Amino acid sequence: MTIWEKREMTEQGRNMEPGMRSLLSDNSRYVEAFRLFLTNSTEHQCMLQFIETRLPDIVSSIGNGGSAINVLGVGSGSGEMDLKIFSKIQARYPGVPINTEIVEPSPEQLLSYKERVARTPGLADIHFTWHKKTSSEFELKVKEEKSDKKYDLIHMIQMMYYVKDAPATLAFFKSLLAPNGKLLIILVSGNSGWSTLWKKHGSRLPLNDLCLYITAGDIADILSSEGATFQSYELPSDMDITECFIDGDRNGDLLLDFLTETCDFNKNASPELREEIMRDLQSPGCSAAKDGKRIFNNNLSALVVERDEV
C-alpha cells in the first residue's frame, strides 16, 4: 500500500467536529486571514530568497537551445513570484522570448496579475496566455485538444493542497516537460509546524474537496515511490503567532482560522479541541519562544523534479 493510499484511508475515517466549516467557505474572511498571515510570516521572503539564490542554477539548463522558452504557472495567484521567476530566466537567456501560460481559477487573482504585468517594465519579450481554470480543468482541456505542447519550466507554488489526486496531478504535469525541463513545487515542509498540526488534528478539522492537508514530505514520498528524479531544498520560514494567545484579539482569531483552515475556529471548535490545539501550538514541534513572542515553524520545501527518461 502506498503512502497516498494510506492517507486516503485516514481521510475516509475522518471525525470532524460538528459545527465547523472550512475557512475557504468564507472568501472574504479567508482573504483577510491570508493577508495577515503574509504580514506575520516570512513566507514570501523565504521564497524570494530561493528564487534569488537557487533558481538561476535550476534554469541554467532549460530551453534545450530552442528559439523560445515555454513556462507554465499553475495556481499563480497575483503573479508576484512569477515575475521574479521570469527575471531569472531573462537574466540567463537575455533577449530570448518567453511564452508563458497562467492557470489560475480566481478571477480576482487573474485581474491582479494582469494589473501587475501592466505596471512592470521589462516584460516586452514575455507573451502571456491566461486560463481561468483549476489545474484539473486545464488538464482536461489539454487532453481534449490532444495538445503536444511541452514546457521548459512548470511551477506550482503553494497549490498542491487544492488537487484531489496528487499522484495523478504530478504524473500529468511531469508529462508536459520538455527535454531538460523542470517542475518546481513549493509546499510547507514535512518538518514544519503545519505538518505537526495536520498529522495530529487533521481528521477533526474541516476538509472539503478543494483542500488537502499535504506537505512537501508527502509529495517527496510519492515521487520517490515512482522513481522520479528530484532535488529538495529546505526554505526556513517563521510566523509570529503571539496574538493567538490573547483572548478576544481579532488578529489572533484570524491567525487561528488560517492555522486550522477553520472559519471562526475560536467560536466553533469544542473546548477540548481548542485546548489541545492551543497547547500543541506551543509545543516544540510547532513553535518556539523568542524575545517574548511565540514563533511558529512555517518552513517550506522546494522540490525540483526532472523530466522522466523516455
Image (cartoon, helix red, strand yellow):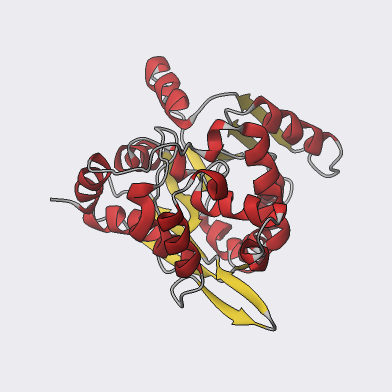
User: Which residue is painted at 29% across and 58% down in the image?
Assistant: 221
Q: Pick the residue in front: 87 or 23.
A: 23
Taking the view exactly as shown, the residue that stands out farthest to the front is: 271
Give left or right: position of 152 versus 253: left
User: Which residue is painted at 47% across and 69% down in the image?
Assistant: 279
Taking the view exactly as shown, the residue that stands out farthest to the bottom is: 291
Instruction: Give the x, y percent position of residue 206.
Output: 42, 41
The answer to whether residue 245 is above or below residue 252 is below
> Which quadrant is home to the C terminus?
top left
Give left or right: position of 151 versus 109: left
Instruction: Give the x, y percent position of residue 186.
Output: 51, 55
Q: Pick the residue in front: 260 or 135.
A: 260
Q: Pick the residue in front: 214 or 219.
A: 214
The answer to whether residue 40 is above or below residue 250 is below
User: Which residue is painted at 20% across and 44% down in the image?
Assistant: 9
User: Which residue is painted at 46% across and 39% down in the image?
Assistant: 20
Instruction: Give the x, y percent position of residue 166.
Output: 34, 42
The answer to whether residue 144 is above or below residue 253 is above
Is residue 124 visible to the viewer in this orientation of the structure?
no
Is residue 56 visible to the viewer in this orientation of the structure?
yes
Tag count = 0
Give left or right: position of 31 versus 17: right
Instruction: Give the x, y percent position of residue 29.
Output: 65, 38
